[in-house]
């Protein structure tokens, strides 16, 4: 695809659109740095910035100025790619919004070590004088993972970010709302306290908890950006302090039905235990197995509990029974995946965390499956549980 984009860029440069210069000016705080970063990665055969020559790794002024001249055309190319992405995406988003579709997007809490963010703003991350991470992110050991989870992302210097009045994070959230209608903030508990692991450790056993910004960050975001449609990914190990932060922020948390089975009736992910409508109910997320795939891989006790709860006999009936359960919950918002609407197995799974290779490759390539029968079935459930948008009402008012 990049060969095609290179050809498109050469043609574009002969007669650039007026909107391109405007885009670069409006996004000058980040797009040029991104273009330079990508141009330098190409010039270094894809190596991480921390493997570049010292002057570029440390962003010495003279070296950056020289690289900007030397790779001017490549920088322009990467700015062009961003321009085309935003131009086309915003047209698609407008079309979706005009037809009653809202788009939910993610903000991961951490940045990759090999990212333009860390290269350009090293002071915001816990790095040593040679720009190597001192501590990295992860999760402590639990009943499921004896070694814990070692993510490897550099953790933030929240003290430095706070002195800058959280400007970088505010801009990060503002930018997300330019392309999404609703933003889900990943690993929300990490803003109360986050798990740190010494860089170079082979597992997450010897980590420790550090204090995060808590509500100071979200108050700063609210002051700058006003009320926002944010979902807090509050899955995993939670404490009273984390729950207090979530309540204070007022953001809806998440309820994932797949997590509801395999333990007792008091499992907090089962709908009869939900205590607030200010939540988002998911049948499963992009990180989960599909519902049918989960049913096929679940142990007998878990599967039996699920079938009794849903009042179904066959595995194949579980996906739609789970969707009904999701739609019938008290949660203000209910979400399911296309794979579950179609009753697909794990060959259609979107993502398996902590793996690389086959993730994010599933595509809906059989549009004929989205027939009237499927639409009517979904519409019926949506109307039964009062989740239908007032589209017909709005059309009549027009």
Image (cartoon, rainbow, N blue to C red):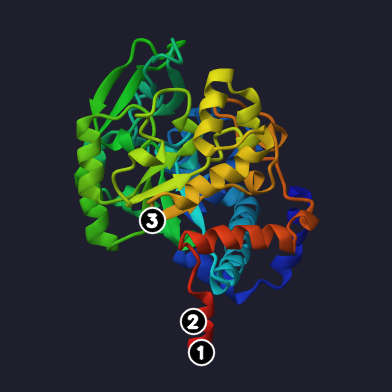
Residue 394: mark in rendering: 2
Closer-to-camera residue (187/396): 396
Which residue occupies 66% across, 44% down?
Answer: 339
Q: Residue 308, image x and y in percent?
A: 52, 32
Residue 341 vertical position relative to residue 55 in the rendered view, above or below: below
Closer-to-camera residue (195/67): 195
Q: Horizontally, is 12 left or right of 319 in the view? A: right
Which residue occupies 45% across, 66% down?
Answer: 26
Which residue occupies 47% across, 59% down?
Answer: 385
Q: Residue 174, image x and y in percent?
A: 38, 58
- Examine the image and state in which quarter residue 313 appears: top right
Residue 332: mark in rendering: 3
Instruction: For the residues labelled 1 and 2, say whether their Cβ atoms are less than 8 Å apart.
Output: yes
Q: Horizontally, is 132 left or right of 392 in the view? A: left
What's the CA distance linking mark 3 and mark 1?
Answer: 27 Å
Secondary structure category for the residue under label 2: helix
Mark 2 or 3, nearer chain start: 3
Mark 3 or 1, nearer chain start: 3
- Examine the image and state in which quarter residue 42 appears: top right
Q: Residue 165, image x and y in percent?
A: 22, 49
What's the CA distance linking mark 2 and mark 3?
Answer: 21 Å
Q: Which residue is mark 1?
A: 398
Closer-to-camera residue (144/109): 144
Q: Residue 188, image x and y in percent?
A: 34, 39
């Amino acid at each position: 695809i990049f060969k095609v984009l290179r050809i498109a860029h050469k043609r574009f440069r002969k007669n650039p659109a007026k909107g391109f210069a405007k885009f670069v000016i409006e996004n000058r705080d980040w797009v040029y740095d991104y273009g330079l970063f990508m141009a330098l990665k190409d010039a270094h055969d894809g190596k991480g910035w921390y493997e570049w020559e010292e002057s570029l790794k440390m962003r010495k002024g003279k070296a950056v100025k020289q690289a900007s001249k030397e790779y001017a055309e490549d920088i322009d190319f990467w700015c062009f790619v961003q321009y085309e992405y935003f131009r086309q995406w915003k047209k698609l988003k407008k079309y979706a919004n005009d037809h009653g579709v809202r788009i939910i997007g993610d903000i991961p809490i951490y940045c990759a070590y090999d990212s333009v963010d860390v290269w350009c703003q090293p002071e915001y991350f816990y790095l040593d004088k040679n720009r190597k991470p001192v501590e990295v992110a992860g999760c402590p050991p639990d009943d499921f993972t004896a070694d814990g989870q070692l993510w490897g992302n550099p953790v933030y210097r929240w003290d430095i970010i706070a002195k800058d009045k959280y400007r970088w994070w505010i801009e990060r959230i503002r930018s997300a709302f330019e392309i999404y209608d609703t933003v889900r903030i990943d690993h929300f508990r990490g803003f109360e306290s986050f798990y740190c692991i010494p860089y170079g450790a082979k597992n997450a056993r010897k980590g420790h908890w550090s204090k995060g910004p808590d509500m100071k960050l979200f108050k700063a975001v609210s002051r700058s950006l006003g009320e926002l449609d944010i979902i807090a990914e509050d899955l995993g190990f939670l404490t009273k302090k984390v729950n207090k932060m979530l309540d204070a922020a007022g953001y809806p948390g998440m309820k994932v039905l797949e997590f509801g089975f395999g333990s007792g009736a008091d499992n907090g992910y089962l709908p009869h235990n939900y205590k607030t409508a200010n939540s988002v109910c998911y049948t499963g997320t992009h990180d989960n197995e599909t519902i049918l795939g989960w049913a096929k891989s679940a142990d007998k006790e878990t599967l039996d509990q699920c079938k009794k709860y849903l009042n179904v006999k066959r595995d194949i009936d579980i996906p739609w029974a789970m969707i009904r359960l999701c739609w019938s919950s008290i949660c203000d918002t209910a979400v399911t995946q296309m794979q579950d609407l179609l009753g697909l197995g794990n060959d259609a799974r979107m993502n398996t965390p902590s793996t690389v290779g086959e993730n994010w490759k599933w595509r809906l390539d059989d549009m004929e499956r989205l027939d009237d029968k499927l639409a009517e079935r979904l519409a019926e459930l949506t109307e039964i549980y009062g989740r239908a948008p007032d589209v017909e009402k709005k059309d009549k008012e027009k």
